[in-house]
Image (cartoon, helix red, strand yellow):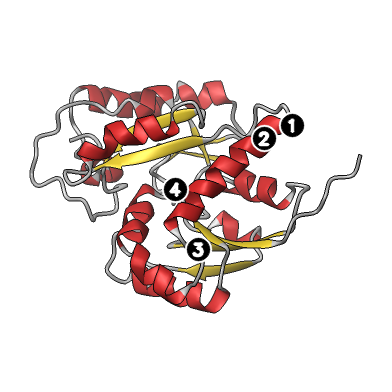
Amino acid sequence: MSIQQLSPIKIILTACGCPGASTLIKRLKGNGERKVTIIGTDMNKEAIGRFLCDGFYEVPNGTSDEFIPAMMAIVEKEKPTLIFPESSNEVLSLAKAREKFEAIRVGLRYSEVTDNIRRLVAARNRRGLTRPVVKLNFVLREDNRHEKGPFIREWKGIVDRICFDDEHNWSRGGVESGGREVLHACLRIWNTFTVLWDGRVALCCLDYDGEEILGDLTSQTIRDVWHSPRLSRIRQMHSQRDFSSIALCRACSKIR
């Protein structure tokens, strides 16, 4: 039975250099139902997505005042069907500027994004598939914590996972720690393993530029890296709440 080809769409995919972006791009382009043109954006001009997308733009940090003007210029030029943000900071910035985007891109509506999520899940379920897993991340701020309950009620039973996380700065500034005392060690270094596109193992998923490299899977095993002296030392420093020699951790508001 042949599959009816749907109308082509164009997607602007932000943070296209983040972990998992390359797999997402390949899945979207190989969906089998329609042609998908992907325009990637990232603050790193050498982001892996640049080499997989149909077009690419280097943009400022998602928390920067320059981010929204840059994105508006891209949207006006590319006229995408939708924007797919992959960074929580960019989600917040884009959501705040929703009316500005809708003013320059007729048809780009917040409601359409939620409708597209529902259609994606429905299409997956019709085929009896369990992949891709659809997870929604809600970034908690002081001005939106009251929306947590309604958000759960809206999406429970539709998507596979609903996650809530406090806003943080991705070790890049934006959300400041305000001098708060470090309260706990970061669990990411005990329960996550971040591999960059070239096989290098980064400190965590926030280290998308590979500033703190723990090993290289082109010449080492996962076990070697997981039990390496460097990672063991970092875990020890976290246990002691000593971040003085780990630049990324020292600047990160996630552990405060």
Instruction: Name the element at disc 2.
Output: helix
In this rendering, which labeled residue sits more in front, label 3 or label 4? 3
Check disc 2 and give the amino acid type: Arg
Position in image of residue 92 (x %, y %): 32, 53
Residue 199 visible in rendering:
no
In this rendering, which labeled residue sits more in front, label 2 or label 4? 2
Instruction: Name the element at disc 3.
Output: strand
Position in image of residue 127 (x %, y %): 74, 31
Task: Tell which circle, 3 or 1, labels the residue nearer the N-terminal end.
Answer: 3
Figure check: 112 above or below 68: above
Q: Is residue 103 left or right of 107 when viewed as pictured?
A: left
Position in image of residue 85 (x %, y %): 46, 53
State how far apart marks 3 and 1 are (Cα): 31 Å
Which residue does the numbered mark 4 point to in the structure image?
208
Check disc 3 and give the amino acid type: Thr
- Residue at x-position 59% and y-position 26%: 221
* Mark 2: few/some/many CA within 10 Å (<14, 14-19, 20+): some
- Residue at x-position 66% and y-position 58%: 52
In front of the other: 249 or 69: 69
Do labels 2 and 1 touch, CB within 8 Å? yes
Which residue does the numbered mark 2 point to in the structure image?
124
The quarter of the picture where the N terminus appears is top right
